[in-house]
Amino acid sequence: MKSTGHCLIASLTPFHSVILKNRGRFSSNFLYGSTSKPRTLCAYHQKSKLPSTSLMGAERYPPPWFSVAPMMELTDNHYRTLARLISKHAWLYTEMLAAETIVYQAGNLDRFLAYGPEQHPIVLQIGGNNLENLAKATQLATPYGYDEINFNCGCPSPKVAGHGCFGVRLMLDPKFVAEAMSVIAANTNVPVSVKCRIGVDDHDSYNELCDFIYKVSSQSPTRHFIIHSRKALLNGISPADNRKIPPLKYEYYYALLRDFPDLQFTINGGINSIEEVNEARTEGAHGVMLGRAAYSNPWQILGLVDSAVYGAPLRSITRRQVLEQYQVYGDSVVGMYGGLKPSMRDVVKPLLGLFHANPGNGPWKRKVDAAFKHCTVQSSSLAP
C-alpha cells in the first residue's frame, strides 16, 4: 500500500524545481484612513496606561504583527501544521469553536483542541452567548496551552448570528460582550481579545463602533481587538457576500488607533499581499490579519512573513521539503479518530494552494485529487 506521503511526493514530481517567485505587487487602490479619517472625534478615550508587556500575546513569541484569520472548515489542525512549516513567526488562529461544543465534548476534547507544539504562537477562538458555557469552555481549553483566547463577535453566518444569536450579532450588546470577556479572562491565564466588524446593518456609525470598543475595554480586561473593516449585513446574504458587498472602511480602523491609544488593534479585511501588510504597518497598524489570501496562496504569503514582516533571514526551504515534512504529519493523523476521520482528503486539502498562480498548478491539483482514488495510509504509528 502507498502512504499519504508517497502519493503526495509522487504527484509533486513535475514541480520539484519550482521556487518562490511571482510575488504579488502592492495594489495602488488599497485605501488607508490616514487621509480620510472622520472629523468627529470619538468621545471615549482610555485614561489609564497599560503595561506594554501585557498588550498583545505571550512575551516569549514575536508580537502578532501578522496573523492568519480564523476560518471555519479551513484553519484546522492540518492547515495550521502546513502554515507553521512555511512560517515560524505568523500567529495562527483555530477555527471558531462554539463554547457548547467544547463543553458537550468534554470527554473527546483532543479532537477539537489538541495541536502540535510547533504551532505556537496559536490563538483559540471561541463563540457563544451563554456565560456559564463560556466559563466552562475556557476552563477546559486552558490545559491545552493556547497563547490567547479570542472571542468571536464578527461571524455573520445565519447559523451563528441568526439562529445561534452570537457572532457579529453580539456587537449590538456590548455589555454582554464585556461580561463574556470578563468571564473568559477569569478562567484563563493568557491574554484575551475580541474579533469584530465595524458595525451591523444600520448600526454602522463610527460613534457606535467607539461605544462598543469603549464599553468592552472599560468593563473587561480586553485590550486587543481584531477589526474586520467591513460592517456585516444580517438580511440573509451569505457569509461570502458579507466578505465583499459591504464596503471596506479602513478609516474607521485608523481612527480607532487615534482615539484609543492605550488599546491594540489588528486590521483585517481586503489585504491580500505582504506588500499590503507592510504598507498597513507603515500607516500605524499594530497588527495585520489575512484570511483566504493566506489559505489559498500559502507559499507566496506565509513564505515571506518571517523575512519581510519580522526581519528574519530568508529561509532556503523548498516546497518539496515542506511536502516531505508534511507527509510525516499526514501519515500520523489519517483515521486517528476512528473510521475515516480525518480522511486523506481532509489532510491534503490545505496543500492544494501550494503552487497557486505557478505554471503547472492545474496539473498539480489534478494529480493530488487523483491520488485520493488509490492511496491509503501505511503507518506504524497507527498499527494496533
Image (tube, grey):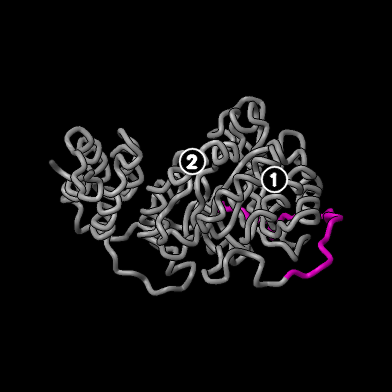
Instruction: Report the quarter where the N terminus lies.
Output: top left
Task: Give 223 or 362, whichever is nearer the viewer.
Answer: 223
Magenta extent: 28-50
Q: Is residue 99 above or below residue 277?
A: above
Categorize mark 2 by other alpha carbons within 10 Å: few (<14), some (14-19), many (20+): few
Q: Is residue 26 rendered magenta in the image?
A: no
Instruction: Report the quarter where the C terminus lies.
Output: top left
Task: Give 39 or 46, whichever is nearer the viewer.
Answer: 46
Estimate the x, y position of residue 142 in percent, counting from the top left: 56, 54
Residue 341 is at least partly visible in this image: yes
- Predominant SS of the magenta segment: loop
Estimate the x, y position of residue 57 in percent, counting from the top left: 59, 64
Q: Quadrant of residue 241?
A: top right
Q: Residue at x 31, y 33 (%)?
A: 339
Q: Residue at x 66, y 51 (%)?
A: 194
Q: Is residue 43 rendered magenta in the image?
A: yes
Q: Is residue 368 left or right of residue 204?
A: left
Estimate the x, y position of residue 103 in percent, counting from the top left: 57, 40
Task: Give 97 or 198, whichever is nearer the viewer.
Answer: 97
Q: Is residue 300 left or right of residue 260?
A: left
Residue 44: image tag: none
Q: Is residue 272 left or right of residue 332?
A: right
Disc 2: which residue: 107
Name the secondary structure under disc 1. Answer: loop
> Label 2, label 1: how many angstroms apart (C-alpha)?
37 Å
Q: Residue at x 65, y 40 (%)?
A: 133
Estimate the x, y position of residue 152 in percent, counting from the top left: 62, 44
